Amino acid sequence: MTCLEAQSNIMGFIDKKLPDDKVTDFVRHVKYCPNCMEELEIHYTLIVGMRELDSNKELSLNFKKDLDEELNRWDNKVKNVKRFKMSTFSIVFVAAVIFFFFMYGQILNKVYHIEQRLIKEKQGKYYFYEQFEDYMPVSQRDIVIDSIELNKPVEKTYYEKIHSYNLTHNIHNNDEE
Ligand SMILES: [Zn+2]
């Protein structure tokens, strides 16, 4: 707010007709601008004094003090609003942080379960056998071991390897030609 704007708001301030945000700017300006403060004091003393005389009220002995109280009242109001805004902001911020960590935990949990499932799938159908071998009755253990043996890929002998190679490559014996 410039000095010109501040001084044009003096009457509005004294009459309490300024919107709140204008008063905030105005009070901030006059606090740090001795010229405008002086101007305000003169107008305040004149106008408030005249009104008190008009309404046959007892004349205030210290207009300066009255004005300072009025200005301080506004200052505190502004500070309280700021404090409230700060606390609202911090509540929202803390809530956001908590929410973030909650979601992060959920995601970690999900990743953990996916990893566990992948490990189980990789280990195949005998996973539970490896885990619970010691708790199985002997007969059941034998069945599992038999089926593991049956499902193992059969190791071919050297002769069998040549035989299957010949079959797949269509190599004929000289006799057939
Ligand atoms: Zn000024």
Image: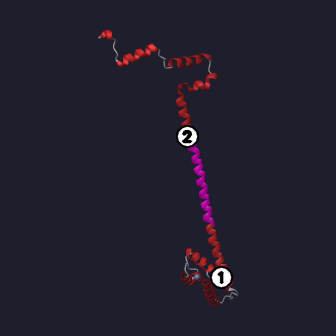
Vertical arrangement, residue 29 with respect to residue 87, above or below: below
The alpha-carbon separation of the residues under discs 2 and 1 comes to 66 Å
Crowd band around label 1 with a 10 angstrom C-alpha radius: few (<14), some (14–19), many (20+): some
Query: Is residue 20 rendered to the left or right of residue 157?
Result: right
Question: On the image, which quarter does residue 40 sit in?
Answer: bottom right
- SS state under label 1: helix
Residue in view at x 38 percent, y 16 percent: 166
Residue 14 position, x and y percent, is: 60, 83
Question: On the image, which quarter does residue 55 sit in?
Answer: bottom right
Crowd band around label 2 with a 10 angstrom C-alpha radius: few (<14), some (14–19), many (20+): few
Amino acid found under the numbered disc labelled 1: Leu
Vertical arrangement, residue 125 with respect to residue 101, above or below: above
Disc 2 or disc 1, which is closer to the eye?
A: 2
Can residue 96 be found in the magenta stretch? yes
- Magenta segment, prevailing SS (helix, strand or loop): helix
Quadrant where the image shows the N terminus:
bottom right
Location of mark 2 (residue): 111
The answer to whether residue 15 shows anywhere in this view is no
Segment colored magenta = 83-108
Residue in view at x 57 percent, y 43 percent: 108
The mark nearer the N terminus, 2 or 1, is 1
Location of mark 1 (residue): 67
The answer to whether residue 108 shows anywhere in this view is yes
Residue 103 position, x and y percent, is: 57, 47
Residue in view at x 60 percent, y 57 percent: 93
Vertical arrangement, residue 162 with respect to residue 112, above or below: above
